[in-house]
Amino acid sequence: LSLSKGLTGGAIPLAVTMATEAIYQAHYGTDRAQMFFHSSSYTANPIACAAANANLAIWRDEPVRERIADLAARQASRLETLARHPRIANARQIGTITAVELRGEDGYLSQIGPRLLAFFGKRDLLLRPLGNTVYVMPPYCTDDSDLDRIYAAIAEACDEIRH
C-alpha cells in the first residue's frame, strides 16, 4: 500500500510504502536468490520526514477533525451566499473543498481559466480555476478573514471577467 500527500499535510513530497511482514523480510533475506533487491532514490529525505513528523504530531495532539468540520461549515455558509450570484451555474462542496462553475463558459476547456488564475494571483490568492470551474481547497488553519477574502474575490471575478 502506498501513501502520500497527507503525511506532510501536502507541504512537501513524501510517500511511504506499507507491506506485509513477509515482503518486508524479503529485503533482508540471507538467500540472495530469494531477496527483494530494491532501493529508492528518495529514501528518508530529512526535511520531508521532519514535515511528516510535525504533521502527524498535529493530527495526534490537536482537535483536527473538529477543525475540519468547523472549516467545512464556515465555507458552506459563504458558498450558499455565492451560489446566488447570477454568474454561478453550479456550486458544490465535499468536506472542505468547494467548487463553483461560471455560467456561460465552456467547461474545463474554457479560456477563462487562465484569466481567473491571473485575477486571483493579483489579489494574492492561490485558487485553482480549471476552465470555468474555480476550486477552493483551503488549509485547515484558514480563518474567517481569509475565507471572506476568497469568496469576495470569486464574486468580484464573476462581476468583472467575461468571456
Image: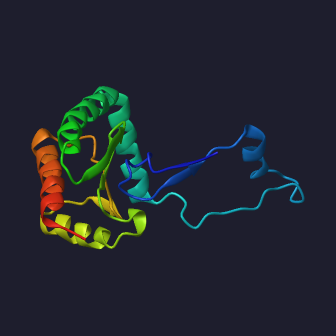
Q: Give the residue at x 76% y 46%.
A: 23
Q: Position of residue 134 (x, y in %)?
A: 30, 56
Image quadrant holding the N terminus, namely top right
- Which residue appears at 78% of the width and 41% of the height? 22
Look at the image and tell me whether residue 16 can be seen.
yes
Residue 67 at x, y = what percent? 27, 31
Indicate how the structure is coloured in the image. Answer: rainbow
Nearer to the camera, 126 or 32: 126
User: Residue 42: x percent and y percent?
Assistant: 54, 64
Is residue 62 in view from this perspective?
A: no
| Residue 152 percent location from the top left of the image | 12, 51
Name the foreground residue: 129 vs 105.
105
The tally of labels here is 0
Q: Is residue 28 left or right of residue 108?
A: right
Q: Nearer the viewer, residue 81 or 66?
A: 81
What residue is shown at x 30% (from left), y 50% (from top)? 89
Which quadrant is home to the C terminus?
bottom left
Placement of 26 over or under 110, stated as above or below: above
Hey, which quadrant is residue 102 in on the image? bottom left
Tell me if residue 100 comes above or below residue 115 in the rendering. above
